[in-house]
Image (cartoon, helix red, strand yellow):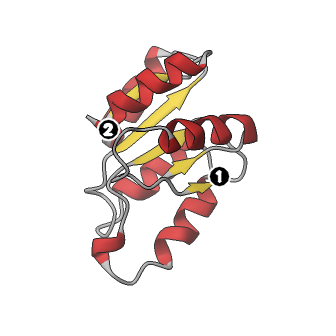
Amino acid sequence: MLAEDDLDDRLLFEEVFSNLPSKEYQLDTVGDGEEVLEWLEKIKDSSALPHLIILDHSMPLRNGRETLSWLKNSPLYSAIPVIIYSSFSDKRFSDDCASLGVTAMMLKPSTYAEYVQMINTFLK
C-alpha cells in the first residue's frame, strides 16, 4: 500500500509496479494517512492486510509520522512493515520514526530509474 498525496508520485509508483517482471505484487494507493486508516479498517480478513505500507512523510490530514505512530500502536497493524519516504533528510525525524518502529527511511527519488531502484529495494 502506498499513501502519497502527490498524484505524479502515485502515478510513478503505479507505472513501476505495472512494469515489474513479477506480477505477484499489487499496489493499492491512497492520498493521505487518514485514508490508510479508513482502508485498513474496512478489511475483515487479516490475510488481506498489506504486506508493506509505504508512507510519504508530508501529507495532509495525517502525515507519515502520525500514521506510523497509529499503525505501530495498533495490535492489528503493528506487525506490518512500514517505510517512510520523504524529500528531506533530518536526523531527529529519522530517530523519532525509528523509535516508533519504522522499517526503513528512504529519500524521495528524483528520476524514474531511482523510483525503480527504490521500489525494488522495498520489495526485497
Rendered view: 79 above or below 116: below
Q: Secondary structure at mark 1?
A: loop
| Residue 26 visible in the snapshot | yes
Q: Residue at x 30, y 58 (%)?
A: 78
**Looking at the picture, how far across and down is residue 52, in whole percent?**
36, 50
| Residue 58 visible in the snapshot | no
In the displayed orientation, state which residue is furthest to the bottom: 44
Q: Is residue 4 left or right of residue 78?
A: right
- Residue sitting nearer the eye, 64 or 15: 15
**Looking at the picture, how far across and down is residue 38, in whole percent?**
57, 70
- Residue sitting nearer the eye, 98 or 25: 25
Q: Is residue 87 left or right of residue 71?
A: right
- Read off the residue under disc 1: 32
Q: Secondary structure at mark 2?
A: helix
- Read off the residue under disc 2: 123
Residue type for callout 1: Asp
Q: Residue at x 43, y 50 (%)?
A: 69
**Looking at the picture, how far across and down is residue 13, in whole percent?**
56, 38
How many discs appear? Answer: 2
Using a 10 Å C-alpha cutoff, classify the residue at mark 1 as few (fewer than 14 neighbours), some (14 to 19) or many (20 or more): many
